[in-house]
Image: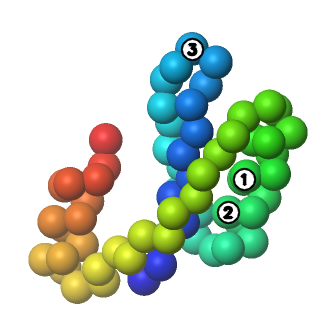
Amino acid sequence: MLLYKTTCTDNFGKLFTRYQGSQTESSKARTALKKDGYKPETQTIEVPTNKSGLLEWLNANAA
């Protein structure tokens, strides 16, 4: 399964991350952040769909 990870740094230097489920949602998220003066970046992330792979991915990436 593909997810789109959009990251951006706020004015105080804090990095924040949002995940989108489609390229359209990702584009909308980037557009909104650019409108607010940020410079967002998006990466395509492959998320495993089997139980053990998904649990491993969530443990490594969920905060």
Q: Position of residue 22 (x, y in %)?
A: 64, 74
Between marks 2 and 3 in the image, the one whose residue lies nearer the viewer? 3
Q: Nearer the viewer, residue 52 or 11?
A: 11
Answer with mark 1 or mark 3, whichever residue precedes in sequence: 3
Crowding near the residue tagged with mark 1, few <14, some 14–19, many ≥20 C-alpha atoms within 10 Å: some
Residue 43 located left or right of residue 55: right
Helix, strand or loop for disc 1: helix
Q: Nearer the viewer, residue 56 or 39?
A: 39
- Pointers 1 and 3 in contact (CB under 8 A)? no
- Residue under label 3: 12
Amino acid under disc 1? Ala
Residue 33 located left or right of residue 52: right
The number of callouts visible is: 3
Q: CA distance from mark 1 to mark 3?
A: 20 Å
Amino acid under disc 3? Phe
Residue 4 bears which disc, if any?
Answer: none
Q: Nearer the viewer, residue 39 or 28?
A: 39
- Residue under label 2: 26
Q: Position of residue 10 (x, y in %)?
A: 61, 25
- Residue under label 1: 29
Q: Position of residue 46 (x, y in %)?
A: 38, 76
Amino acid under disc 2? Ser
